[in-house]
Structure formats: C-alpha cells, structure tokens
Amino acid sequence: MTRYFLLCVLILSCFVSLAQKDNLEVEYSIDVVDESDMFGTIIFYKGILKSDNIKSEFKLTTKDTLIDSELFGLFENHSPSFQKLFYKDLGNSVINYKETRGLKNAKIVKDKSKITWTLSEETKIIDGSKCNKASCEFRGRKYEVYYDKDIDFKDGPFKFSGLPGLIIEVNSLDGAVKMKANLITYTLEEVPINPYEGLVDIISFSDYKKQYVKHFKKMTGYRSDIDSEVFIPKRYIEYLVE
C-alpha cells in the first residue's frame, strides 16, 4: 500500500512538473544601426522575453558596444541604467510600456499594435531548427521574419508577435534592424504581473508620436550661441517622425 501510494505521488508530481513547464524564456540580441541620415540611431540591446502564450514581458537593456560609424564617427553604446519593459496582452494585441524619449514627463504608452503578416512557404535552418518565413510592414520598415512552428508560442521580441510559432529572427529590409534569439529555455517561473495595471497616466502610441514630433521640431529648430545644430532621431526601431 505504501509503495503504491509513493508511486501515485511520483506520477502526480511528474504531471505537475510538466504542466508547470508551459512558460518560455528567450534571450534575444537586438542591433539597430540606422545610418541612412543624421536622424537615425545606433543602439545595441539585450532582450529577455518571458511568455506564457497569453501574456508576456519583454525587457530591454543595452549592451556595451564600441562601433566606428561612417556617419556618426566613433560611437559608444553604454547606458548601464537603461531598462525598458514591454508588457504584452497577446490575445488583445495590446502592449503597455513606459516612454520617456521626447517627453517632459514619462508616460505609459498603450499600443494596440496588431501586425498583418504575410506567410511564405520559404524555410531556413537557424541553429539547427527549421524555421518558416513571414513578412510585414511595421512602423516605417519592411521586415523578413523567421519563426519556429515547433515552439508553439505566438510571441517574439519587441512588439513582434502573432505568428504560429516563436519568432526566432527579425531583419528589416533596409538592413537597420536585426533581432535574433540566442537562448531558449522552458521555465517553471510564471510571467510577472503587469506593472502598468491600474496606472492612469496613459496615452496611445499615435498621441505619443504627436508629442515626439513637437519635441523633434523644437530641438531641430534650436540654435546655440555658436550656431550649432541639434540632431535627434526621427527613427529608432519604429519611425516617430515621417
């Protein structure tokens, strides 16, 4: 009887363990090198995605990088205090995050950013896995994306999601934006709760863009005593000034 009881407990614990491994953690590298004019940007990120296929958290931090840019000269990517957290409601295609760029006071952006994907029969082997191709236009750039249908998570880096598998690689056709999954782990950890839930200082992405455009015009119209100009980006990953 005791032996039978222990066997049942062991089987039950195995089922519980398997059920708890439904969550996913993915580490991405994200490179943005936009040198098409002085209003682009250069920045290198590490991104960590934690997803349960219903909601997810995507956390960006910067990577220390030194690059010799033809347009910007010697450029150092070093912001140890920088961190940006995107919280996705995958079912409703809503993303919340805190934004400071171009704003006098930080705002919570509520971004309803459902992407329209075009699926392709084309495939590519990435790190030993067969991935399918998809394409889209999103916020000023055209992208080619590869996703793994064997990893049944409709999620990915930054604001990209909605494909029938985990997004492994993202490349903009202009060559400025590159994203790649480096490490994929199944985890027992739950996705953290939404830190923006209940906050009231919220704006839409379109309203945020309007405020950024005002900031852009103000700064680019500024002249110092030595008649020097101020250059600020029109574009990060997304276009903010058309």
Image (tube, rainbow, N blue to C red):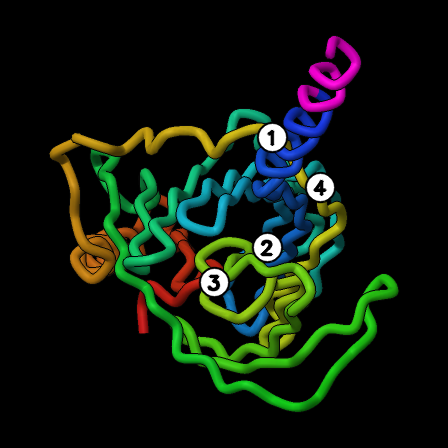
Can you name the residue that lies furthest to the right here? 128
Furthest residue toward left: 200
Q: Residue at x 54, y 70 (%)?
A: 164
Crowd around label 1: few <14 · some 14–19 · many ≥20 (10 Å): few
Q: Give the spatial CA distance, label 4 vs label 1.
A: 18 Å
Q: Is residue 41 magenta?
A: no
Identify the mark nearer the N-term, 1 or 2: 1
Measure the alpha-carbon separation of dots 2 and 4.
Answer: 29 Å
Name the image quarter holding residue 212: bottom left
x and y percentages locating residue 39 in the rendered image:
45, 64
Mark 3 or 1, closer to the camera: 1
- Image height of 124 relative to 81, above or below: below
Q: Position of residue 221 (x, y in %)?
A: 25, 58
Query: Given the image, on which type of amino acid does mark 1 rest?
Result: Val
CA separation, marks 2 and 3? 24 Å
Do the CB atoms of the residues marked 3 and 1 lie less than 8 Å apart?
no
